[in-house]
Image (tube, grey):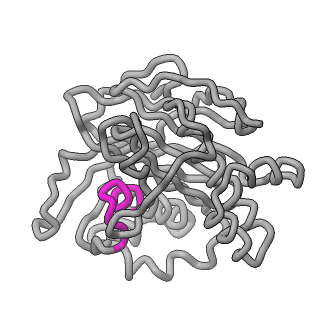
């Protein structure tokens, strides 16, 4: 049985939980007990074992992580989806109304982001598993992003593609609207070393100053972006934990690759040093 130890989540912190998407058969049985019947059926719909394992780890991690912040058994969480299909904590979950979570997974890594009282989006990508991702750049990037990508030396374009892509995905996930937001109607500027700037077309009805961003490299092959709603003058600290199992973890001192220019770059124990 997995017992969750409660931890605090102040409003000026955002917590990221990282986990490997590999699970052995013994732990898979334990993880599966946490899932509801719909999740178990969904797991079995995946043809490849690696995809079933990634789904299983993701759903079990979400449930156990949420139980670190609220006294609810991991298998008792109830989820719903918004009008755009984004998973959310069901409104009837007592005491968890201000908890926001977002999940992302790719080959080798599962990420769960947790915040209180603010919209949050996370995206992680393995830069080596997609076939020719640059071929779709013209369909998903704004003109300014395509121009900047084209000016780079060929050997740097793949990495830059995923920097753009994870930022864009984190933004539409934070908005809770997914790809219903036209990807070419907003853009990121990455020309300044270590900084990221967001520009949004007026017809989207959003203010770039509403959002702040972080980007990091948990491993050589992974790019991870975070988009969070600004709720106060100071920037929240990002606290990263690696879930070595569903009931144990260790703090991870990752460094930022890029941040929004107005972030105040403060950190604390377990947060990301700049």
SS majority, magenta:
helix
Q: Quadrant of residue 88?
A: bottom left
Q: Position of residue 107 (x, y in %)?
A: 68, 61
Residue 178 lies within the magenta run = yes
Q: Position of residue 101 (x, y in %)?
A: 45, 46
Q: Which quadrant is home to the C terminus?
A: top left
Q: Report the residue at 41% width, 52% height from top.
A: 90
Q: Nearer the viewer, residue 165 or 31?
A: 31
Q: Report the residue at 49% width, 26% height from top.
A: 271
Q: Nearer the viewer, residue 1 or 144?
A: 1
Find the magenta span and give its range. 169-179
Q: Position of residue 191 (x, y in %)?
A: 33, 53
Q: Position of residue 109 (x, y in %)?
A: 66, 52
Q: Is residue 45 above or below residue 197?
A: below
Q: Nearer the viewer, residue 145 or 118?
A: 118
Q: Image check: 76 left or right of 271?
A: right
Q: Report the residue at 53% width, 23% height from top.
A: 7
């Amino acid at each position: 049985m997995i017992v969750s130890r409660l931890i605090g989540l102040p409003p000026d912190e955002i917590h990221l939980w990282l986990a490997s998407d590999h699970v052995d058969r013994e732990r898979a049985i334990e993880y599966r007990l946490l899932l509801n019947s719909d999740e178990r059926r969904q797991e079995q719909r995946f043809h490849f074992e690696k995809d079933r394992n990634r789904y299983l780890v993701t759903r079990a991690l979400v449930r156990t992580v949420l139980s670190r912040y609220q006294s609810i058994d991991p298998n008792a969480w109830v989820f719903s989806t918004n009008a755009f299909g984004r998973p959310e904590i069901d409104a009837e979950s007592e005491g968890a109304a201000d908890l926001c979570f977002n999940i992302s997974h790719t080959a080798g890594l599962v990420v769960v982001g947790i915040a209180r009282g603010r919209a949050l989006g996370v995206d992680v990508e393995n830069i080596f598993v997609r076939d020719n991702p640059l071929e779709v750049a013209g369909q998903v990037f704004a003109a300014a992003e395509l121009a900047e990508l084209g000016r780079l030396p060929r050997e740097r374009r793949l990495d830059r593609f995923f920097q753009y892509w994870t930022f864009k995905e984190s933004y539409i996930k934070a908005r809770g609207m997914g790809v219903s937001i036209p990807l070419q109607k907003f853009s990121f500027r990455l020309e300044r070393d270590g900084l990221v700037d967001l520009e949004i077309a007026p017809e989207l009805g959003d203010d770039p100053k509403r959002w702040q961003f972080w980007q990091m490299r948990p491993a050589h092959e992974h790019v991870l972006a975070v988009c969070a709603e600004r709720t106060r003058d100071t920037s929240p600290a990002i606290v990263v934990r690696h879930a070595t199992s569903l009931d144990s973890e260790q703090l991870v001192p990752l460094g930022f690759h890029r941040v929004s220019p107005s972030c105040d770059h403060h950190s604390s124990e377990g947060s990301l040093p700049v």
